[in-house]
Image (cartoon, grey):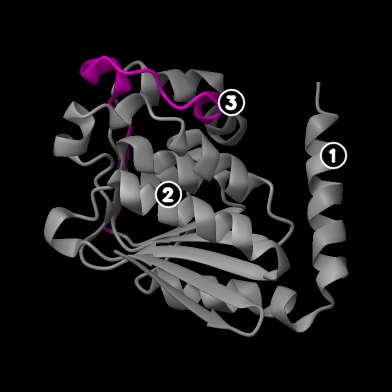
Amino acid sequence: MIKLEVTGDLWIATLVRPEKANALTLEMLRELADIARRAQDAKALILTGEGKAFSAGMDLKAAKDGLATDPVWEELSSALAALPGFTIAALNGTVAGGAMGMVLACDLRVASPQAKVFYPVMKLGFLPQPSDPGRLAGLVGPARARLILMGGAKLAAEEAERYGLFDRISSTPLETALELAQDVLGADRSHGTAIKQMISAGDRMKP
C-alpha cells in the first residue's frame, strides 16, 4: 500500500489505497517509517498519494484496535524531521487527522487547489501526536494552531496557503515538488544538508 520509487538520489513514496481515501493502517505507517529511516542518503524525499485525497487520516477499523495511541505515528514524523535531505509533501488532495503528522514534518508542502486540511482531535477525543502542535504553531502561529486543533476548523487550500501551512498551490503538486527539488538534486549532498541545518539553527534562535 506504499509504493516507493528510487531514482538516483530522489525517493518518492506514494500512498496507494485510493478506494479508502488513503486511510492509514498500522502496516502503512510502519512501512513509511521504515522508508524514512532508510532515506538517509536521499537528497530529496517526496510524499504523495494516489486518487482524490492525500490521506483521510487513520483507518477507522484500525482506530478501534488502538492505532490512535500507537507510537508509530510519532516514529514516522520524527524520522522524517530528522532526515538530512529535502522533504516535500505533494498533496494530491485533502489531508486529515493523523496524516497531518508526516505532512507537518516535511520541509515543504505543495497542495492541489482542491486540498483541504482538518485535524479533528478535539471532536474525536484523541490527543494529537506529541510533536504536531509545536510544528503546526511554528508554521501558522499559536492562535491558528488552536483554531485547527481546538476549534475544528477545516481550511481550504487558499486559506491554508495564506496561513503558511501550504507553501505552494499547484494543479500538478507532484510535478511542482519535483521542480522544487531540482536544485538540491543537482548539488552536492553536503551542501543541501548544510543549508537545511543553518535554517533549522536560525529557527531555534527565534525568541
Identified by mark 3, the residue type is Gly
The image shows residue 80 at horizontal and vertical percentages of 59, 50
Q: In terms of image quadrants, where is residue 196? A: bottom right
Q: Amino acid at mark 1?
A: Gly
Compare marks 3 and 2 and give the one earlier in the sequence.
2
Mark 3 or 1 closer to N-term?
A: 3
Magenta extent: 114-133
* Mark 1 or mark 2, earlier in chain: 2
Give coordinates of residue 89: x percent, y percent: 48, 58
37 in relation to 163, above or below: below
Q: Could you tell whether 16 is left or right of 81 in the image?
A: left
Q: CA distance from mark 1 to mark 2?
A: 32 Å
Q: Position of residue 203 (x, y in %)?
A: 78, 36
Q: Mark 3 or 2, which is nearer the eye?
A: 2
- Check contact, mark 3 vs mark 1: CB within 8 A: no
For label 1, the residue is 202
User: Label 3: how many residues lie within 10 Å, few (<14), some (14-19) or many (20+)?
Assistant: some
Q: Percent x, y for residue 206?
A: 81, 27
Where is mark 2, residue-wise?
30
Cβ–Cβ below 8 Å for labels 3 and 2?
no
**Residue visible at 61% across and 72% down in the picture:** 180
Q: Is residue 180 magenta?
A: no
